[in-house]
Image (tube, coloured by chain):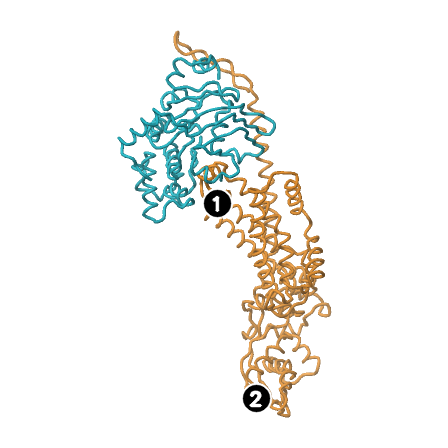
Chain colours: A orange, B cyan
């Protein structure tokens, strides 16, 4: 310390002289504290930086997935093409197998003013339309065969490559041979965009469609339903089982070697790699119990096993945190052990239990590895009606899309990640709200 | 709950005092925590409608003895009790005695006020409700009101019965705990240093309350305060190192004790 004590002039009586200040290392202590704060801030800054990078990269790549390029043109449902010999009354199969892409191609060609073209030109025009148009037009005709011979406006998906080009994701300076869209297609694209025929719409298909090899028609619908089924199964099974196990272990079980062993093992189970649970599920639920492969019920059961230790540990911690004085008070009044637990201890532990459960569920929602082993990494195009039907899960869908080559799958991968993150955020907000709701002071 | 008129209560008291009837009798009570022995063959008779104070230095076993009286020691891992404790002729450690019923007959008030984090009303009504003592809502209201009145808390809380019990002051919380114990209509109330967390004014109120409760209940109180023991009790038992040193009328205990150790402790020479 550089300060020298300048003693003020003293009067004869009264104030005693201040003793010389001792060096008790204040400077060092404060410096240490400042250093520690800096480390802390640096650590937090590091974490925030990477969180920001993650969000930025996902959102910047993924936000376009929520828009989809669509073409709206008048389509002539030509009897000539669809049912030349007028045999649809006799043979219902006729309308199922008719060549629908041709009428869409012809409609687009008419729109572009290409009245007659060679095969190559027509193929390029076809290449601007999603193959999903076949099913779309077929559904229109099968639902109402009277449209045949008429013309009506139809909105259908642009091809994935055109969609990417329209969103500016394809580098047009590259040599024409090395990219997926030709110069002529780009010209037509601009022409259609100017006339308002080609426009971006909100991509509802992303949330409703199942798997598809055509990126423009692929969606997370099946994965969402699959994840929903699994979350419900996990919640319904792991919450009661986990809470019952914790209450027994914490409040009723005798404290002996066996309970110690069980406790150690539960803690170990929480640290077991999730892929091991996948193997267990494969062996027990599919091979032994004979449940169907790829089904949400097996996924739910596996994730239940995986979530149980988390819930048990959180619940036991919450029960331990209830002050013993509350137990004594209830027991002293003559409440039975069970009444003490259910009337007093459990309500006070509820916020902790719910937080633990939701964190466990969020963990399960993001889990991929065990689902790969039980066959949930599958091409499922139909929305599963029950948990016994084949389904995928959100993280698995992300994994599958990340393996696809097309440019349009890149944005869908990030889009699906955004959907998953939104669900996780919602669950965590739910956990906080529930905790606030149940929290009581004592 | 039958509230006796004052004169009747006095008569009963007088009769009890003359006859000396014992509510609880401990014979050769020893308590072990694992291998450690905490009480050595304690024999103590608790008189009916009397306040018995248990005094002694910290760790002397007085709280341990108190807790054997309603088997609260059962909840402590590794705790073992030998000897006999009799309540109205029944050994309370006999397997035929149900501990839940015992605790409904022998209530307890703890050192730290521990109201449930629920409303004042629910705090008091909890005991009667689980024991089925009040059939209707009106019955329950009456039990709650009587209990709060007995605990001297009614006037302070009658307008906010449905507010949280934890929002009261420390002294009020402790009286709420007493009301909660009283609501079950026990025969004996055990108090484990009920005033140690309270200020002198709250302490005075509780002591006054103990005086009044004596008419209807047998009270055993553990206290660290010699003055409190002298003020509230009629009988005093002195514990030291797990042994019962002396048990006597409070007046005699504080003026002319039989045992030298009691004399020393009361004079402040150890403890």
B111 sits to left or right of A26 = left
B129 sits to left or right of A419 = left
Mark 2 surroundings within 10 Å by alpha-carbon count, few (fewer than 14), some (14 through 19), many (20 or more): some
Q: Is residue A112 above or below residue A316?
A: below
CA–CA distance in space, label 2 to label 1: 76 Å
Q: What residue is disc 1 on?
A: A339
Q: Position of residue A104 (x, y in %)?
A: 61, 80
**SS at circle 2:** loop
Mark 1 surroundings within 10 Å by alpha-carbon count, few (fewer than 14), some (14 through 19), many (20 or more): some
Q: Quadrant of the C terminus of chain A?
A: top left
Q: Is residue B107 above or below residue A350?
A: above
A10 sits to left or right of A212 = left
Between A140 and A319, the one nearer to me in the picture: A319
Residue A349 visible? The answer is yes
Q: Chain of mark 2?
A: A
| Residue under the image location 58 percent in, 70 percent down | A69
Q: What residue is disc 2 on?
A: A149
Q: Is residue A323 above or below residue A201?
A: above
Mark 2 vs mark 1: same chain?
A: yes
């Amino acid at each position: 310390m550089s300060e020298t004590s300048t003693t003020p002039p003293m009067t004869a009586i009264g104030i005693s002289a201040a003793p010389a200040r001792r060096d008790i290392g204040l400077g060092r202590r404060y410096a240490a504290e400042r250093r520690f704060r800096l480390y802390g801030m640096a650590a937090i800054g590091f974490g925030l930086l990477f969180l920001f990078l993650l969000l930025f990269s996902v959102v910047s790549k993924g936000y376009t997935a929520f828009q989809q390029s669509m073409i709206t043109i008048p389509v002539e449902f030509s009897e000539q093409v669809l049912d030349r010999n007028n045999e649809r009354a006799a043979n219902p199969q006729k309308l199922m197998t008719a060549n629908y892409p041709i009428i869409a191609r012809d409609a687009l060609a008419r729109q572009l003013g290409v009245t007659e073209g060679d095969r190559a030109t027509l193929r390029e025009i076809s290449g601007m339309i999603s193959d999903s148009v076949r099913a779309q037009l077929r559904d229109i005709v099968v639902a109402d065969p009277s449209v045949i011979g008429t013309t009506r406006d139809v909105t259908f998906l642009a091809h994935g490559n055109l969609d990417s080009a329209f969103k500016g994701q394809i580098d047009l300076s590259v040599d024409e041979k090395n990219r997926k869209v030709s110069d002529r297609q780009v010209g037509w694209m601009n022409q259609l965009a100017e006339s308002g025929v080609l426009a971006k719409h909100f991509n509802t298909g992303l949330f409703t469609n199942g798997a598809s090899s055509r990126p423009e028609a692929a969606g997370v619908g099946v994965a969402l339903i699959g994840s929903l089924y699994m979350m419900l199964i996990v919640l319904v099974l792991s919450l009661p089982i986990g809470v019952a196990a914790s209450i027994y272990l914490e409040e009723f079980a005798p404290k002996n070697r066996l309970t110690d062993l069980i406790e150690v093992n539960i803690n170990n189970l929480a640290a077991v790699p999730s892929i091991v649970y996948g193997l267990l599920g494969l062996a027990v639920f599919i091979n032994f119990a004979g449940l169907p492969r790829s089904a949400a019920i097996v996924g739910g059961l596996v994730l239940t096993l995986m979530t149980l230790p988390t819930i048990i540990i959180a619940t036991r911690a919450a029960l331990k945190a209830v002050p013993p004085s509350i137990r004594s008070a209830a027991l002293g009044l003559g409440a039975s052990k069970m009444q003490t637990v259910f009337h007093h201890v459990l309500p006070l532990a509820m916020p902790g239990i719910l937080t633990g459960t939701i964190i466990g569920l969020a963990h399960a929602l993001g889990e991929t590895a065990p689902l790969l082993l039980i066959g949930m990494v599958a091409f499922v195009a139909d929305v599963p009606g029950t948990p016994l039907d084949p389904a995928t899960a959100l993280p698995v869908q992300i994994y599958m899309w990340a393996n696809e080559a097309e440019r349009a799958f890149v944005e869908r991968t990030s889009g699906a990640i955004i959907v998953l993150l939104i669900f996780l955020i919602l669950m965590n907000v739910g956990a906080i709200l529930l905790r606030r709701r149940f929290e009581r002071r004592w | 709950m039958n509230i006796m008129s004052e004169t009747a209560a006095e008569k009963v008291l007088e009769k009890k005092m003359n006859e000396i009837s014992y509510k609880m009798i401990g014979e050769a009570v020893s308590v072990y925590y694992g291998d450690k022995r905490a009480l050595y063959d304690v024999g103590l008779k608790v008189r009916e409608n009397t306040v018995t104070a248990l005094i002694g230095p910290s760790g002397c076993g007085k709280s341990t003895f108190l807790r054997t009286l309603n088997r609260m020691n059962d909840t402590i891992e590794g705790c073992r009790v030998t000897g006999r404790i009799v309540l109205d002729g029944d050994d309370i450690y006999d397997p035929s005695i149900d501990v839940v019923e015992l605790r409904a007959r022998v209530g307890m008030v703890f050192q730290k006020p521990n109201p449930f984090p629920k409303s004042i009303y629910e705090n008091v009504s909890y005991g009667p409700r689980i024991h089925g003592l009040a059939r209707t809502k009106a019955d329950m209201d009456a039990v709650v009101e009587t209990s709060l009145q007995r605990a001297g808390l009614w006037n302070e809380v009658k307008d906010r019965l449905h507010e949280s019990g934890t929002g009261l002051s420390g002294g009020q919380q402790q009286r709420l705990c007493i009301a909660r114990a009283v609501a079950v209509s026990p025969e004996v109330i055990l108090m484990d240093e009920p005033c140690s967390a309270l200020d002198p004014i709250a302490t005075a109120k509780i002591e006054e309350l103990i005086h009044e409760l004596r008419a209807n209940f047998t009270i055993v109180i553990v206290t660290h305060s010699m003055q409190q023991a002298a003020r509230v009790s009629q009988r005093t038992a002195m514990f030291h190192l797990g042994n019962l040193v002396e048990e006597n009328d409070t007046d005699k205990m504080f003026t002319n004790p039989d045992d030298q150790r009691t004399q020393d402790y009361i004079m402040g020479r150890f403890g």
